[in-house]
Amino acid sequence: MKYRIISVGKIKEPFYAEGVKEYAKRLTPYCSLDIVEGLEEKISPKAKESEIEKVLEKEGEKILNLLGEDDYVIVLDVTGKQMSSEELAQFIKEVSFSGKGRVSFIIGGSNGLAQKVKKRGDYVLSFSRLTFPHQMAVLILAEQLYRSFKIIKGEPYHK
């Protein structure tokens, strides 16, 4: 199964980039993982709601253009379902048998995601009710994917 993380923001901080790279490397025996980043539109920190909506629409179009009918889309959003690592592993296992060719995880920028992206999602997942920087969310997701595969295979890592 192919997996892809689509992050609206770019992973700029070296410590996040190195961590993501490490988990992507660790995942190679289990799956193919692609990371798409840097879809973020420029916007003023003082932008009005109408400007934010326009930016979200543009970012949303970029994301939707990356998705095919064969993608199982998981949107990360604070309103989504929270899972334990074991539950996520079981979910990943089930999704792997969904008949889809690829699982795409979507991580929004600081303004979130356009409604049309959320509607395209087959599932909405939340790591926490806390807000994380998108770079950290990508790292956490990469680590949790690795942990999930270790759990699925019954290999040591998860305790």
Image (spheres, rainbow, N blue to C red):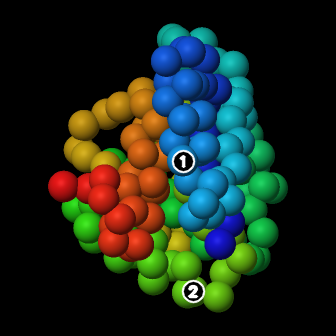
What amino acid is labelled 1 in the image? Arg
Residue 98, given in percent of the width and then of the height, sits at 57, 86
Kindly indicate the quadrant of the structure image that contains residue 96.
bottom right
Q: Is residue 13 left or right of residue 91?
A: right
Report if the CB atoms under discs 2 and 1 are less than 8 Å apart: no
- 140 or 41: which is nearer to us? 140
What amino acid is labelled 2 in the image? Ser
- 131 or 100: which is nearer to us? 100
Name the residue beneath numbered marker 1: 26
Residue 68, given in percent of the width and then of the height, sits at 78, 69
Q: Is residue 105 above or below residue 53?
A: below
Determine which of the numbered discs, if any, sits on residue 98 in the image: 2
Q: Is residue 91 above or below residue 30?
A: below
Local packing at callout 1 (Cα closer than 10 Å; few below 14, some 14-19, many 20+) is some
Q: CA distance from mark 2 to mark 1?
A: 24 Å
Determine which of the numbered discs, if any, sits on residue 82 in the image: none
Residue placed farthest to the front in the image? 156
Residue that appears at 60% across and 43% down: 25
Which is more N-terminal, label 1 or label 2?
Answer: 1
Kindly indicate the quadrant of the structure image that contains residue 71.
bottom right
Q: Closer to the camera: disc 2 or disc 1?
A: 1
Residue that appears at 45% across and 54% down: 146
Residue 155, given in percent of the width and then of the height, sits at 35, 65
Q: Secondary structure at mark 2?
A: loop
Local packing at callout 2 (Cα closer than 10 Å; few below 14, some 14-19, many 20+) is few
Residue placed farthest to the left in the image? 159
Residue that appears at 31% across and 53% down: 157
- 10 or 157: which is nearer to us? 157
